[in-house]
Image: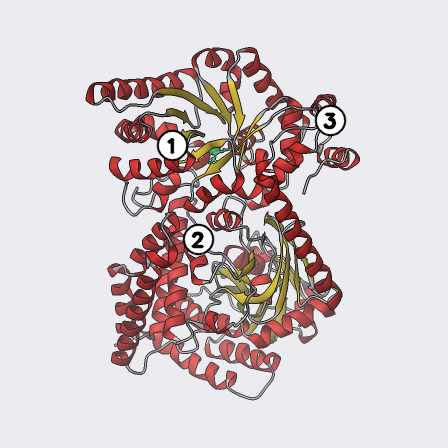
Amino acid sequence: MQSPAINKAMEILQQLRSISEGQDGIEVKLNKIVKMIAEQMQADAAACYITIGGNRLVLFAAYQMNEEAINKVLFRFGEGLTGEVAQNSRTISVADAWSHPKFVHKPELGEDNYKSYIGIPLIRWHRSVGVLALQSKELHEYTALETEILETVAMVLSEIVSSEEMSEWRKNYDRGSQMGYREKLKGLSLSKGYGMGVAVVHRRRQIVSKIFAEDKEKELHRLEIAFGQMNADLDKKLDAAKLGIGEHVDILDAYRMFASDKGWYKKLVNNIQSGLTAEAAVERAYEDMWNRLSGTTDVYLRERLHDLRDVSDRLSSYLSGDFGSVKSIDSPDIIVVAQTMGPADLMDYDYSKIRGLIIEDGTPTMHVAIVAKALNIPVVAKIKGIFSEAKTGELIAVDGMEGYVYIRPSQQVQDNFRSKIEERQRLQAKLAELRELPACSKDGININLYLNVGLAFDLDYIESTNCDGIGLYRTEIPFMASEIMPDVDRQISYYQELMDRSGDKKVVFRSLDVGSDKLLPYWGNVGEENPAIGWRSIRITLDRRAILRKQIRAFLRAAAGKELNVMFPMITNLSEFEEAKETLMLELEKEKRRSDKIPKKVNVGLMIEVPSVIFQLDSILEQTDFISIGTNDLAQFIFACDRGNPRLTERYDVLSAPFLTVMNEIISKANKHHVYCSVCGEMASNPIEAMALIGLGYRNLSMSGSSFGRVKSMVRSINVEEIEDYVHSLLKSNKKTLRPQLISYAHDHGIEIY
Ligand code: PEP
Ligand code: MG
């Protein structure tokens, strides 16, 4: 027995299908569809709005409303009831729209006689691609049954409004409405470099055209085959001989476990049993979870949602037999365009061919962006609408220096890119030549340059850069990539590999820095309201002391016979540092009793990331062997600005007097106490920011491997004494940012800031 809602929805969908299979153009079809839906639902009027430019809605089709308003009336997301539906991707139903505080009257719509309103979001990829709205003259409360029918119909309608035909219409609309032809699009650079190649749209979701199963057994069989094939292919990807060893393999392994989850499979089977096709069953399972979790601020749960989206799309492409279309792109240069992406997804491609990555919803701290950076792939993010706009097979150029993307670039742009790519290759070759040369300024000051590592790829940089050592080993990265909490022996193997590859070079281990945006798959949700300032990092490991003790034990054993440097992240006051240090010392004593294989020297330090420690710095400096400044977190707390929020990424600048003054205070005190001080946040990886740090007196910088050559080249072209005078003279400036001045200074003084 199927529910009455399903029966009614099926009736509407049958009519909808016959309209959409007709020969009419998309405008005529949608006008017919909204009329049919209004009649079937006994509404007096209906409208279909389409999202344009990622944040506005335009009236596309209407029934019993002012026809003149079509293609003209616009709602911003969040504006009026319709804008609100799109903004929150949630249905709104009100008996008297006029009395609703969000209602906005647009006289040109001709809706003056209507009272009741129901708006249903048309959702694809968690985004509102449009809104279906029904109105009636009577004060009508929409029942749960009616809402369910409309939401089911909206699922199919959202596929229609996301069709190729519609995206053509959108492009024409954009052009016609003077929004400018989107050939050159501005985004945010997440990884530098230039790349040009053939676009591969990353697993664009399949259109679910058939919702209800005609033959349940057949659908179950299709699901079984696709599920089995997908998992078999994922198994193949784990062939360690091809992928090498390291965290990327672990990441893929975790992904595979998720893809073969029995609970998920059971849900899909149940959905098919209730009458859906296999494709619709996959979507329904995702939507159920999305409805439950989309409102959560919990990063861990959001991540799970993300995983389910990825794996649902993968399964859908197997169901449609479309998987492997990537391989049919026979080009040595590809540009991957994704709405969002997990780090494991990069493994779907031959990454030696990836010339660029465009992630519509990317943020700088996103895992895949970090992996791409390690692989030297330029990445541009935050271009609204690019995912639906770009088409597989068309030429795209990515400018990761300035954050631009060019779709179907003109011949002139292509030539320009080719010469920039060549220039960059020459630069890379030149930077590689720097390997043997010292990181010494023009006036003879040596700057120690270290690497930040975490992923297995990073270890290759130890040899290729000839760095002074490892300034930061983010130990949580192997923990994050692991399916279960690594035991002491497993940890020793990670740490030993790093020690071995580093030879006699200095290595600084950071104790587990989890929580906030770095969550372990095997730890349950801790329901943090404000994860960045919540139970994270040292706060967790002090409370769960056994974890810290085990990690310290692994450090001590891995560094037997060598010098061991351990630092603690997110220290907020002296007593926290003392507690952590005491834990280490106790473990050291235990190790001494256990074996004679202990490190020949142990240095204990802390990260300066929380502003409160700066006010206690003198006392702290008396007790610590070294400090390292995590400018990523320090800036987030100094500016009270979430480092992972894409809306805020360009709002405050570390190159401004308040932040530089704090940094000046820290290095001055460290020098006064003769305590070794380094910077290991992103500031040290960016040549212009690293230049400012040197100007403040910093002599130890730890950076990502891909930035190493550029920072070294900057160091070799500066005069430290001059830059010190200049940077100190800027500390009184009230400007929002000092970046332009510092860049001009670099240009005027021949400082190489690539
Ligand atoms: C920092 O906060 O600057 C830092 C180096 O630590 P992470 O980026 O790993 O939080
Ligand atoms: Mg940090």
Q: Report x, y in % for residue 547.
A: 28, 31
Question: Eyeballing the image, is 270 above or below 503?
Answer: below
Q: Is label 2's Cβ within 8 Å of ligand 1?
A: no
**Which residue is the site of mark 1?**
535
- Which of the two residues, 725 or 22, is positioned nearer the viewer here? 725
**Which residue is the site of mark 3?**
734
At a point 44% along the width and 53% down the height, the residue shown is 343
Q: CA distance from mark 1 to mark 3?
A: 35 Å
Quarter of the figure that contains the C terminus: top right
**Mark toward the start of the polypeptide (1 vs 3):** 1
Give the structural element (helix, strand or loop) at label 3.
loop
Quarter of the figure that contains the N terminus: bottom left
The amino acid sitting under disc 3 is Asn
**Mark toward the start of the polypeptide (1 vs 2):** 2
**Which residue is the site of mark 2?**
343
Of labels 1 and 2, the one closer to you: 2
At a point 52% along the width and 21% down the height, the residue shown is 677
Left or right of 131, for residue 224: left
Question: Eyeballing the image, is 75 above or below 214?
Answer: above
**Mark toward the start of the polypeptide (3 vs 2):** 2
Q: CA distance from mark 1 to mark 2?
A: 25 Å
Residue lying farthest bottom?
23
Q: Report x, y in % for residue 367.
A: 46, 47
Q: Is label 1's Cβ within 8 Å of ligand 2?
A: no
The amino acid sitting under disc 1 is Trp
